[in-house]
Image (spheres, grey):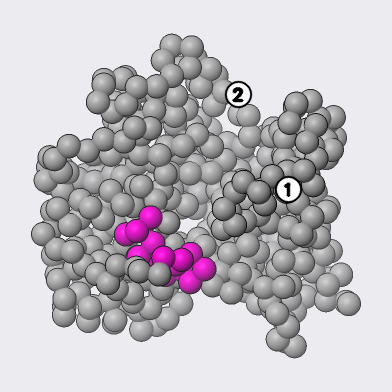
Amino acid sequence: MNVAMPTNEMTRTGVAEVLDQKRKFLVPSVYHFYKDPPLMTRGEGCELFDSDGRAYLDLYSGVGAMSLGHSHQDVLAAAHQQIDELQHTTTIYLTQPMFDLAERLATLAPGPLNRSFFCSSGTEANEAALLMASQFTGRGHFLSLDGGLHGRTKAAMSVTQVPMWRTDPFLLETCQCAPGYHDESSLGVVEKELRTRDYAAVIAEPIQGNGGIIAPPSGYWQTLRKLCDDTDTLLIADEVQTGINRTGTFFAVDYEQVVPDFITTAKALGNGFPIAACLTTDTVANVSTRPAAATYGANPIACAVALAVLEHHERNNLAEQVAEHGRCLVTHLYRLSRQTNLIREVRGRGLMVGAELGDAEHQDAAAIADRVLEEMKDRGFLLGKTGIGRNVVTFMPPLVITEEQLSRACDQFGTVLQKIAGE
């Protein structure tokens, strides 16, 4: 990898000083990866650079947000042009980028999902879907799946079923949980719940991200769609992580050939700029008539960037490329799983792939994952970790990553696993 000397003024502050600032001025819940964390100062393509000028191949891309990588020229050009013309208004004024983005998303979303509500984060988009579901159905109860993560605000956290993210001591009692994709009883419990109580909506991720990259069994979403239809329950697909070609189709529900009543999306849509959207149908949207605004939702710069991101995806056929590179990544990881007993399972789709770690001696799998991440960081590779037990090493790189970069990362991943296994 190329090593560039730091140029940012921020590099005058060292890691120790920054950690001291963190301890003094941030709330303790704001955590970071690594015992020995680098101080990131610059990004370019699929690489990040720290305050010492060292390069890291970014295989987590801001939890999947940097779909085109860092400092992408299309993104920067769109942002610079827009900021020169108009930096900010709100949704109470007319701005062309907001309407162009809404129209573009309507052409890309499945079925009749042609209405958008724009906000700044996936959490807000999920809150918007939950609110409109209650407005439309006149019901206040929601059903979610074990292993799902939907946000950190009151309602979004209440439908979240990953224990480490359920930090509110007074979660809403109107939110219930059914077993997740890993449990064969899941759909049976969902059906019983929907036929026993009137729910406004079921909310689920087509592939559970923070739950450990858990995909549903074949046919799951088709059956879930029918159960919702039979009980007049709305279906919310949380595509905050899976959306915008992350799994090899524009939305992950496209792979399942299912049209939900809502799709929420964020992260990759803005390539690091804060924008999110809640998509729904004319029928559902028409009940949302009371005033609703988001100060930073549909910010002109974020909308202009999102339009550039979508145009680049389409022009370069990223969906096909992601599917191909995802198969390459999974092939590498399966090969490694045959060479070491530290990989229990490889799973995922497209460039959203997890390797669940553990060994026959039942050592602390989370500690093994932490060790792997630290070792990989020291070798110049940044990975994620997910799962209920925090033992799933997660690959969610920029969608423009090359097969050579993936191969190099997997080779180092294998070397680290063999080192740990041999100790």
Q: What residue sits right under mark 1 in the picture? A: 20
The dot on residue 73 is: 2
**Residue type of the residue flagged with mark 1:** Asp
Q: Residue at x 59, y 74 (%)?
A: 389
In which quarter of the view is residue 362 placed?
bottom right
Q: Is residue 187 above or below residue 55?
A: below
Q: Is residue 364 magenta?
A: no
Query: Where residue 136 sits in the image (x, y, percent)?
Result: 13, 53
Residue drawn at 84 percent across, 64 percent down: 415
In this view, the residue in front, 418 or 264, is 264
Q: Is residue 207 above or below residue 125?
A: below
Place of residue 254 in the rendered image (x, y in percent of width and height, measured from the top left): 37, 52
Amino acid found under the numbered disc labelled 2: Gln
Q: In which quadrant will I find the C terminus?
A: bottom right
Q: Is 422 placed left or right of 126 in the picture?
A: right
Q: Is residue 138 visible?
A: yes
**Magenta residues, start to end:** 153-168
Q: Distance from label 2 to label 1 (Cα)?
A: 35 Å
Q: Position of residue 144 (x, y in %)?
A: 33, 68
